[in-house]
Image (cartoon, rainbow, N blue to C red):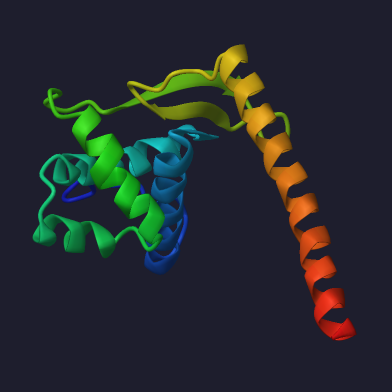
Amino acid sequence: MRNKTGFNPLSRTAAHQRAMARNMVTSLFRFERITTTSAKAKEVRKAAEKLITRSKVDSVHNRRTAAKFIQDEKILNKLFTEIGPRMKERNGGYTRILKLGFRQGDAADVVILELVDYKLPSSDDEASSAKKADSKKSAAKKAPASKAKTDSASEAK
């Protein structure tokens, strides 16, 4: 008889299930797309959908409720400022599961769990992000050299 078996324990203890769900939901909100097994994705989707529904209304109570689950403050802020407002018009179904196939080692069913409005990065986006990274590196190289000059000047006095 199947009474009250509404979740898949994934052969883990309760603490491990909770920690894994927290980590995977945080990764989902950080990258907006993660690759995992089918069983894990179906469990993580439940928690992610509930958090996105909460994030549609930015209130102190909703933030504190979500903060119990998401420990990273930057990701929590992203959830309420970016992801929640993007999903305002949707009544549910914020995530999508795309099947990839079977994993080589253990033949586990591998899927992609992503937010429905996820956009693949285009080549223009990659080129602009590479230019920004190069400019930051060059600025970082220049800053220590100028600091060294001021340090040597102060030592000379």
Q: Residue at x 15, y 23 (%)?
A: 90
- Residue 92, above or below 139: above
- The answer to which of 23 and 147 lies nearer the viewer is 147
Among all residues in the image, which is located at the extreme top?
123
Which of the image's four quarters has the C terminus? bottom right
Q: How many marks?
A: 0
Q: Position of residue 71 (x, y in %)?
A: 37, 63
Q: Position of residue 31 (x, y in %)?
A: 48, 37
Q: Tell me where residue 40 sits by quadrant.
A: top left
Q: Residue at x 28, y 36 (%)?
A: 83
- Residue 55, above or below 68: above
Q: Tell me where residue 74 sits by quadrant.
A: bottom left
Q: Is residue 36 left or right of residue 104?
A: left
Q: Position of residue 91 (x, y in %)?
A: 11, 26
Q: Residue at x 19, y 58 (%)?
A: 63
Q: Can residue 19 be seen in this snapshot? A: yes
Q: Position of residue 106 (x, y in %)?
A: 67, 36
- Residue 30, above or below 125: below
Q: Is residue 28 left or right of residue 124?
A: left
- The answer to which of 67 and 50 lies nearer the viewer is 67
Among all residues in the image, which is located at the extreme front?
157
- Residue 69, above or below 104: below
Q: Residue at x 39, y 42 (%)?
A: 29
Q: Is residue 102 left or right of residue 20?
A: right
Q: Can residue 47 be seen in this snapshot? A: no
